[in-house]
Image (cartoon, rainbow, N blue to C red):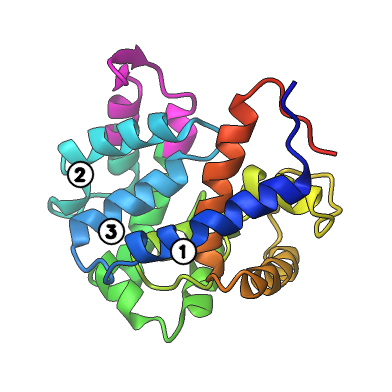
Amino acid sequence: MNSYTPETISKAVAAICPDIQSYIVAPMVSDERRMWWELSCCILSSQVPYSLAVAAADAIDHNELFYQARVTQESMAQRLIKILSNPLLVEGKPRSYRFPIARSHQLAATYSVVLQEAASLSDLVNSFSNAAEGRNWLVKYASGMGPKQASMFLRNIGISYELAILDRHVLHYMSALGIYSGESSSISSLSQYCRHEIVLQEHAKGLDCSVGMLDWAIWIVMRVANQNKEVVLI
């Protein structure tokens, strides 16, 4: 039986961090369409497989809903519900999206509040003085975006690699290393999220890796480990 100790997992993460940092770092996304795709995918990925969220975001993007003439929030919600209620092709197989109505209303509300605040999503993002301010705004005003989703969005569009994405894989990793003692696999409170983020940032410094890149490394290693049914963390 293969047994993966916390030390083994940590060494695997540290080993791939340099490769991730050299491969993934990219300039900030400035394309409005790409920004909306990333934001949609972050909201759609909550409690569903990432591949399904990508397929859902692709379907919305294909219909170009966010780039047409402005529509009311309710009209946007109904259009989104129609798209997300249809089967989505994921890895060659039709799949149903789990929360078509709830996520459609969240996306429509976010679309509405973004355009109330700025002329476009890219204008809104560019108005933030720093990543923390951007995350605070998104958590407060963007429906369906908690601190994890907001951090992921800002990282994926290249705003900052110093925000942690504390998903279940990362929290499992932190728990195995003894640097997270919470029982929850998700953290919804921004203040609590920031406290645990600081802990992971310090861990990242010890590996000479930005925390945004460390997240990617942990996600890769933990997914591989968890796919092995014989994994034991002791």
Quadrant for the C terminus, please: top right
The image quadrant of residue 47 is: top right
Determine the CA span between mark 3 and mark 2: 13 Å
Number of residue marks: 3
Q: Residue at x 72, y 28 (%)?
A: 231
* Side of 15 relative to 128 (left or right): right
Residue type, numbered disc 3 = Met
Residue type, numbered disc 2 = Leu
Sequence-wise, the earlier of marks 3 and 2 is 3
Identify residue for label 3.
Answer: 35
Magenta extent: 79-103
Secondary structure of the residue carrying tag 3 is helix
Q: Residue at x 71, y 22 (%)?
A: 230
Identify residue for label 2.
Answer: 65
- Can you give x and y, in whole percent of width and height, for residue 92 in the image? 27, 16
- Can you give x and y, in whole percent of width and height, for residue 98 in the image? 48, 24
- Can you give x and y, in whole percent of width and height, for residue 160 in the image? 44, 73
Residue type, numbered disc 1 = Pro
- Can you give x and y, in whole percent of width and height, for residue 71 in the image? 22, 50
* Side of 59 relative to 41 (left or right): left
